[in-house]
Image: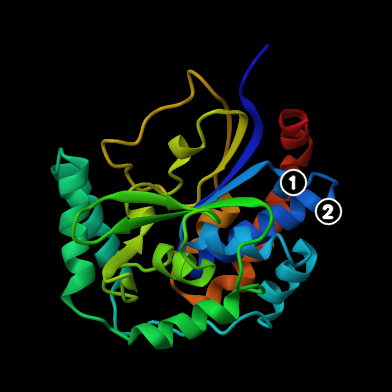
């Protein structure tokens, strides 16, 4: 008899467009009776951490309509950062640095160079995104990286870190949002290790891995496909086209949510067969 736990849902990073697409995808699946947010464990990275928390308190259809109608939390436009260039720099570091911890320390040095906006200002934005500010009953993991040491961590309700701080840190893209200070240490986006960090869901019998961006994983991200039944979902052609090159562009949220929803409806039977 297997000693593995049952199901894990892995939600990826991807900026405000990642939130929109993931929300649409999950809502599309639910419209067909496929509820994957009932997983025993949800691992959220960056945008995925936001969606993970939202999914536990607000109906997915409401979250989807907020994305389509622009009635969700305020998303400030980013006009002073070349996000595609920043992603390319990060990709170059990953591909040219063999040691994963050293790689994360290099990126961490970017996170500590300066704060584009003050930490309290950014925290207000995260608070507005989250319908609750205390960890939900559902076991949710949130991925972060300590900037000065490169240490990767997964925080949950047992870690002694507030939910808002954990999500804010997981969403702190260096040079875009400030690293988050917790007990004198600063933390940034866990998505800089991997878009999904799916290996941190190992031990579950079934893992539904949703991946939004094609960016390289760091060297210490392990392949768990040999020990875990993993089903992967990535943006289809319509979603990829609608995404463009800047995942931080709030003007495209409605389009990404809609294409995500349509994809969720289309693949629902396949996902149902796996999840059941």
Q: Secondary structure at mark 2?
A: helix
Residue 218 higher or lower than 259, as above or below = above
**Residue at image mark 2:** 31
Q: Quadrant of the C terminus?
A: top right
Q: Percent position (x, y) of residue 105? A: 18, 55
Name the residue rendered at 58%, 72% in the picture.
253
Q: Of 221 and 266, which appears nearest the observer?
A: 221
Q: Percent position (x, y) of residue 136? A: 66, 60
Q: Secondary structure at mark 1?
A: helix
140 to the left or right of 104: right
| Res 266 → quadrant | top right
Q: Percent position (x, y) of residue 182? A: 35, 70
Name the residue rendered at 74%, 46% in the picture.
38
Residue 154 higher or lower than 233, as above or below = below
256 to the left or right of 68: left
Earlier-in-chain disc, 2 versus 1: 2
């Amino acid at each position: 008899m297997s000693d593995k736990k049952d199901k894990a849902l892995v939600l990826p990073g991807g900026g405000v467009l990642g939130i929109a697409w993931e929300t649409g995808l999950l809502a599309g699946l639910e419209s067909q009776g496929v509820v994957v947010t009932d997983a025993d464990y949800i691992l959220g990275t960056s945008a995925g951490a936001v969606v993970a928390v939202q999914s536990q308190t607000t109906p997915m259809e409401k979250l989807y309509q907020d994305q389509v109608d622009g009635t969700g939390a305020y998303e400030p436009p980013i006009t002073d950062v070349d996000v595609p260039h920043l992603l390319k720099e990060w990709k170059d570091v990953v591909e040219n640095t063999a040691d994963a911890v050293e790689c994360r320390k290099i990126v961490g040095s970017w996170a500590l160079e300066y704060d584009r906006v003050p930490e309290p200002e950014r925290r207000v934005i995260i608070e507005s995104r989250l319908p609750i500010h205390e960890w939900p009953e559902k076991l949710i993991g949130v991925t972060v990286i300590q900037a000065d040491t490169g240490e990767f961590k997964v925080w949950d309700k047992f870690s002694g870190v507030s939910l808002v701080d954990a999500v804010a840190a997981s969403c702190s893209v260096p040079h875009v949002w400030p690293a988050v200070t917790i007990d004198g240490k600063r933390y940034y986006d866990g998505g800089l290790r991997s878009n999904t960090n799916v290996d941190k869901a190992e031990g579950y019998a079934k893992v539904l891995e949703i991946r939004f961006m094609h960016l390289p994983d760091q060297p210490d991200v392990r392949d768990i496909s040999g020990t875990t039944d993993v089903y992967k979902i990535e943006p289809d052609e319509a979603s990829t086209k609608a995404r463009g090159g800047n995942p931080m562009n709030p003007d495209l949220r409605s389009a990404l949510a809609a294409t995500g929803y349509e994809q969720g409806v289309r693949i629902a039977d396949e996902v149902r067969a796996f999840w059941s």
